Amino acid sequence: MKQKIYLPISLIGVLLLIPGAVAYAGEVLKPDPAFNTGACIIIAVTIFFLLLLLLWLIRLARGLKEDETAREKYGDKWIFRQINSLDSRQLDQLISRRNSRKKAISKAKGGNNGFTAVMVLLLVFSSLAVHAQTPGESKNVLTSPGMIIMLTLIFVPLVVTVFLVALKIRNLAVKTRYSRVKKETSELAAAVDNDDAVYEDLIKRQRALNYHLTNNELAGTIEAEDSKGMLLNVDEVHGPRFFASKRKAAPKHQTDPKLVKLIMWYLGTATLWLVLGTSVGEYIGIKFVSPDADHISWLSFGRLRPVHTNMVFWGWSSIAMLGLGYYVVSTVSNTVVYSIKRGYYSLVLMNAAIILGSGMLMAGINNGGGEYREYIWPVMALFAAGIVVSLANYIQTIAQRKTKEIYISNWYIVSAMMFLTVIVTVGYLPFYQDGLGETIVQGYYMHQAVGMWFMFFNLGLVYYFLPQQLNTPIYSYSLGILAFWSQILFYTLIGTHHFIFSSIPWWLQTVAIVGSMGMLIPVFSGTTNFIMTFRGNFNKIGRSYTLPFYIVGILFYFTGSTQGTAEAFRETNLIWHFTDFTTAHSHLTMYGIIAFMLWACIYTIVPRLTGNEPKQGLVGAHFWMALIGLLFYTIPLMVGGTLKGMSWRDGKPFIDSVVLMAPYWLWRAIGGSLMWASHLVFAWNMYVMFSGHKSDPDIRKEVFEKLDTIPVNAEI
Amino acid sequence: MEIYNNHKKLFTAALCFFVLLTFFVAIGPAFTSQNNNAPLPGSKPLNRLETEGKAVFIAEGCVACHTQQVRNVDMDKVWGTRPNIAADYANITRTDVWRNTATLMGSERTGPDLTNVGTRQPSNDWHYLHLFNPRSVVAESVMPSYEWLFDIKDYAWPNDVVVNVPDDFKKGITGKIVATHKALALVAYLRSLKEVTLPDGKPVPIFLYGKSEAEKAAANTPGKGVTTKPEFDGAALYASNCQSCHQGNGEGLVGAFPALKGSKVVLDDNPEVQVTIIMKGYNGRVSEGYGVMPAVGTNNNLKPEEVAAIVNHERSNWGNNSKKVTADDVKKIIATFGKPETVIAKK
């Protein structure tokens, strides 16, 4: 009977499945409309668990069968296999048993450990199987109460039966195994006691198990000496650590101090605008939760919203990009910046535009409401002048390059600068902007400013900084070129997708939607290029405090841009347009892509320029607060925005859509606060990188720096 | 390729490509739109006060939350009787030498669309209260308060527009709350925002993505375990059309909007007066300090069934309990008004 035990077990298992399957088949066939997708899911889950149970039974049966046949299979070698499967302690027991020459079989515990292990394993499996039954039943969400009761009445005995039979089977299997192991163990003990050959094998096996390396087989015992100075940054860890320490930045570069100063001015003012601009953003985010926070005209929502958007657009992102551009354009051209002085002119013009523009917006002077086009033309002219001055500077730097070809970073950067000049000019010239002309231009203006300025410039920066930081060439130059031309082709067309279903010509809306789909080409090729550049270097992410910023930037580059495509379709636009979903999307892209990439570049390059590193823990704090804050910000707004759109579609009163947003706006404020706090940390990190501030100054370094000024024979 | 080693050729090529596409997708269509659309015959340019009001609207950044575009999709039906067309914006030209054209179409709808707000909400009193503190009329609103558009005076001049703010929202203000010139202008501008009827013969664009007749029929077919929902939800219609003045609790606002709870008109078993007020407006209680009620039913194009649902909602809530009306009753009463044109002509 024992030999064939696996057969009845399998049989019982199959029988067990039949009632369940029949019950479900019956349910599936019922034509009741209440059986919706939910019911299908429940059925699928239950069938899944039943299959799992069947698998477990088969496994159990097969295990028993294998145990039975093992002895016949291995013949004489069986006993040595047994010895090899024992651990050192069990071997000790057998040896001492033989040595003491006692012959009580019942005391041999050899197999008991194995037995316990089996028991534990079986318990785990059986508890899994037991738990597996319950969710399938409790998940029943059918609407009609009678149906629920009926199904429960069918299920309860079914589940209990399945559970009891499974228990029975398991006990049977355990018993079988126990008696077999017991028998085998006693046979083994007898063999050890009586057969010297077996005993010798046992001793040999024990010696092998007890063998340990001395840990100096290869190194020897001679003290190590670093005669070539190859070991740097040796980091010994004493005691527990909370933060993994990351690689230090490369030593300071020999960059022209004048250029360093220029770049630091750019990045410094950009940081100021980031902190100010997001403080404003944080405040207007809070106003959704607490609309009566103040009743001051200069601080009202309608006036501050453009202050926030323009400040982070033109102040933070643009100025930071230009500052980093000064480094990249000259470095990849293997030359010096054409004119440092013009760099300052440009910086002053741009900052003046933001100061003036923000003040005017708060005073209620704006251009008429188009997003990112709120600065009036004299202010924007200042900004554009700043861009043109730097553009000329960049081109002249490239003209005097020492390399034959133009590195792809400079394609993107210079094109972005040229395009922005065109975009601003087109956006502010009045000749074609009466009536709906204004709206057509608005769609073009705001979206080109995002894609052909910020995205293009940032891609240029990343094409330099990412390979440099990974110390590997860019994966494919050709993909970069494909992305370059295809982005110009498609992105330029997509502006009017902000006005789908409006009075703008239908064909123009369709062109925008097609262009949005076409954007998948540059986005996929760009993402592929970056990810493939990362290939083989993913292990570096954990050891670096800059690479996480790159990887997040690239991730959002892919998801954020693809989300833009998804939003452009007419069917989705129907739900998401005009809702907070667009706010989430713009933050996912302008923050997730642009800001994260800029931080990546800044943390990469600034320590090399100034020779001062930020505290790694604080960079980590900046990263995590910004990332978690962004997720807290965007995901609730996407959910809420979708619900809002659905509420409109269902013809609910408008005020319902305001009420339903309340919790999502609260989450937005929480996420926004985290993001804002991370910017304060970033500003502090910038200060540390700029000034070399250290909480514990390197006294030795300072003494050595002063050493030369002290006369040789003087007392120190 | 040589182009990749020559910065002049490379950057010129990229720039030309971009500018060419710009002409195709922005400048060209903008020119076409500007030159091929004339203002509709029924539209009239903003007068001086309304123009000043529009300047206030722009300065305060109202466009951040309020759109002015009725899209040709079904869900926008609540904001206008027809989708906007390019000609609706044709009479909007450059604001002044410093500022661009302001079509104010907007891109976010945190607040309601304003294309037709002049028709939907023609009450001055409501607008002043709402601007002073939106939560005084719409409790759930998140709109900012525009307190700075109002003066606090100890005594009001005869020409001053005094706003009767409920005590809860006065925040210790003891004087008279008087609308400034800017507030008057802004409200004049808001009231000027009305859809213009398309001239005869011009095809009216249709709303897309509406429920098909089959879907509507399916939703209304009883049986098969689906609980039938009435097609016209009185509570929702009340919230959309009446609640901002008469409030969710039917108590109105003292000194501004009369209560419906316990109102003689609502409790009257004969619905004639109630339906007439909804369809034609009412100014009978101005002497008591209450505002003029606009012809909500006519302005918002409510169907007799919808009016009946609203009337029944009012008649069966807040302790009110009077005789229900049917859509046919409403139709009969409306029929006594004469042709609908006369209603519009009277305005």
Image: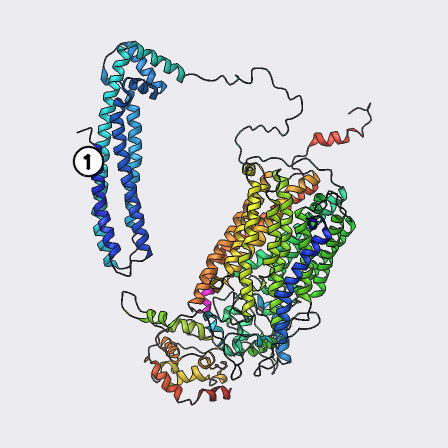
Q: Quadrant of the C terminus of chain A?
A: top right
Q: Is residue A655 magenta?
A: yes
Q: Quadrant of residue A51?
A: top left
Of A303 and A5, the residue lying toward us: A5
Give how far across and how far down residue B200 sits, in percent: 52, 84
Coloring applied to the structure: rainbow
Whether A277 is drawn above or below B143: the answer is: above
**Which residue in the protein does label 1 denote?**
A8
Q: Look at the image and tell me whether residue B234 can be seen.
A: yes
Does A475 sit left or right of B326 as displayed?
right
- The kind of secondary structure the magenta stretch mainly shows is helix
User: Considering the image in quadrants, where does the N terminus of chain A appear?
Assistant: top left
Residue at the left extreme?
A1
Is residue A705 toward the left or the right of residue A532 in the image?
right
Q: Disc 1 marks which amino acid?
A: Pro
Q: What is the span of residues highlighted in magenta in the rendered image? A: A653-658
